[in-house]
Image (cartoon, rainbow, N blue to C red):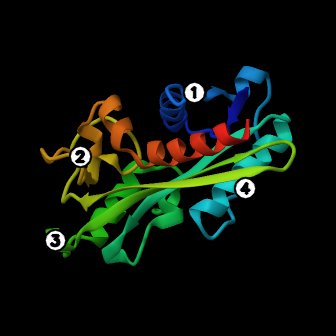
């Protein structure tokens, strides 16, 4: 069975495709089936609610089972910010540089031991018959004092994952290394297991 991925973020789309392949989920993009998905207004108050809004809209518009994720960075010293507003933290949606600058500025006086954070992903699948499945995943770490690395996207250049012992940021990892520990992989692994029970 083919599944549609609902995202307009090219880098996230590539990552989702990389991760879902080995899990046995065949995914298509909207352009693969000749449609263009509507940009969904993310009005939910949680990652889970926003993932459902995107998956439900994609399923309705395509008539196919649709997978969507909503993800972001949760920083303990900032009471969970940027959270669900991660992509538009500095005001302009998808401006990674400005978002990172705002984050580093707000954490400038926070010592290393208090810079704990986690990436969170909620992955949702909605079927045309109304069935829905949801899984979440996390990747824990800390926020660096400056950017390092050119890979990945979003806050990857300032995120130091605790699963990487040599102190590299997420942006300094290879795509394969990142996929192994990523919040998105963990959410999608859980979702894949739920899907396989249903089909």
**Residue 53, which numbered label?**
4
Percent of width and height locating residue 73: 41, 60
* Residue lying at 79% horizontally and 43% vertically, measured from the top left: 127
Q: Is residue 40 visible?
A: no
Sequence order check: which comes first, mark 2 or mark 4? Answer: 4
Q: Secondary structure at mark 3?
A: helix
Q: Secondary structure at mark 2?
A: loop
Sequence order check: which comes first, mark 2 or mark 3? Answer: 3
Frontmost residue, 119 versus 93: 119
Distance Cα–Cα, label 4 vs label 3? 36 Å
**Image-quadrant location for residue 118:** bottom left
Frontmost residue, 12 versus 18: 18
Distance Cα–Cα, label 2 vs label 1? 29 Å
Question: Residue lying farthest front?
Answer: 197
* 58 is higher (above) or lower (below) than 22: below
Name the side, left or right, on which 149 lies relative to 124: left
Question: Which mark is nearer the camera, 3 or 1?
Answer: 1
Task: Name the quadrant of the N terminus.
Answer: top right
Distance Cα–Cα, label 2 vs label 3? 16 Å
Residue at image mark 2? 169
Is there CB contact under 8 Å for labels 4 and 1? no
Distance Cα–Cα, label 2 vs label 4? 31 Å
Percent of width and height locating residue 65: 76, 37
Is there CB contact under 8 Å for labels 2 and 4? no
* 22 is higher (above) or lower (below) than 160: above
* Residue lying at 51% horizontally and 38% vertically, measured from the top left: 12
* 60 is higher (above) or lower (below) than 109: above
Residue at image mark 1? 24
Label 1: how many residues lie within 10 Å, few (<14), some (14-19) or many (20+)? Answer: few
**Residue 113, which numbered label?**
3
Sequence order check: which comes first, mark 2 or mark 1? Answer: 1
């Amino acid at each position: 069975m083919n599944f549609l991925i609902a995202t307009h973020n090219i880098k996230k789309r590539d990552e989702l495709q990389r991760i879902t392949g080995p899990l046995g989920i065949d995914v298509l993009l909207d352009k693969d089936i000749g449609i263009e998905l509507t940009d969904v207004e993310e009005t939910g108050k949680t990652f889970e609610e926003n993932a459902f809004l995107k998956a439900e809209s994609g399923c309705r518009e395509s008539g196919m089972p649709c997978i969507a994720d909503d993800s972001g960075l949760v920083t303990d010293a900032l009471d969970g910010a940027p959270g669900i507003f991660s992509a538009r933290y500095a005001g302009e949606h998808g401006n990674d540089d400005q978002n990172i600058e705002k984050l580093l500025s707000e954490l400038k006086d926070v010592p290393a031991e208090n810079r704990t954070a986690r990436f969170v992903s909620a992955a949702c699948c909605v079927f045309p018959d109304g069935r829905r499945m949801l899984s979440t995943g996390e990747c824990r770490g800390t926020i660096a004092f400056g950017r390092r690395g050119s890979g990945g996207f979003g806050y990857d250049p300032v995120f130091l994952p605790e699963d990487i012992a040599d102190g590299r940021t997420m942006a300094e990892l290879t795509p394969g290394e990142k996929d192994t520990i990523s919040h998105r992989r963990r959410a999608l692994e859980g979702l894949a297991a739920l899907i396989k029970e249903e089909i």
